[in-house]
Amino acid sequence: MACCSQVICDGCDCANKIGQIEQSLERRCPFCRHPAAKTEGEVKQLRMKRAEANDPHALLPMGSDLYQEGDYGSALEYWRKAAELGNAEAHYLLSNIYWEGKGVEKDIKNAIYHLEKAAIDGHPFARYNLGCIEENNGRKDRAAVKHYIIAASLGHDASLEDLRECYAEGSVQKEDFAAALRAHQAL
């Protein structure tokens, strides 16, 4: 992630770093061209500045840091705010915190709500987890398979394995499995 909280792919970040090294340039953010943070303290300071500006890409790691420290309540607040701003990963993390009951009362209904929001926003792990829930509830033939197909199409490996098993059992049509496999391989 860049200092201005823009999400950048690893390849683009690597290309930017290589160009700066080859040309002996000072390390800068590839988006805003601001000098890169040199210490962990500077990184936290820039992240806090972006979090105060309600940037969901900054709120998410702030919550994750607090979660790792065991401060589940504060992590929950950062992730809630990021989720309100439309961050799918925040919805996914909220689903986990409600499912496990860390920092909040265990609430499966709320966990599923956040899983559904994350899945709708294209989060493959959330989609896969919904498929697992449907399978555990005895709805493998239709609901679970549908979630597995979508998750596999988004590049989720375990979904593809579950689809392979469903295909072997006859729960998935050959065309659906082939389409999911092609989409998975295209990523």
Image: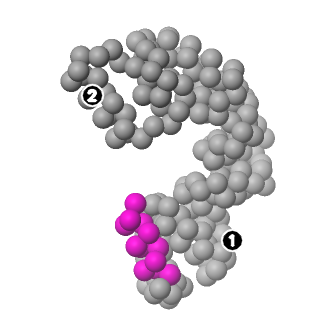
Residue 45 - label: none
Say which mark, if any, is on residue 137. Answer: 1
Local SS, label 2: helix
Total labels: the figure holds 2
Q: Is residue 8 visible?
A: yes
With respect to residue 161, does 177 lie above or below?
A: below
Identify the residue shown where x is 50% and y is 81%: 176
Q: Give the residues drawn in magenta, as a range.
A: 176-187
Query: Which residue is denoted by mark 2 in the rendering?
Result: 19
Kind of residue indicated by mark 2? Gly
Between 133 and 63, the one lying in front of the other is 63
Residue 141's x, y, as percent?
Answer: 61, 82
- Vertically, is 54 above or below 176? above
Q: Please, what is the three-letter code of the amino acid marked with disc 1?
A: Asn
Residue located 32% across and 34% down the image: 14
Residue 10, x across and y down, in percent: 37, 39
Q: Nearer the viewer, residue 157 or 7?
A: 7
Asked which quadrant contains residue 21, the reply is: top left
Query: Helix or strand or loop: what does disc 1 sit on?
Result: loop
- Residues at marks 2 and 1 touching, judged by CB atoms closer than 8 Å: no
Tell us which disc is closer to us: 2 or 1.
Answer: 2
Q: CA distance from mark 2 to mark 1?
A: 53 Å
Quadrant of the image for the C terminus? bottom left
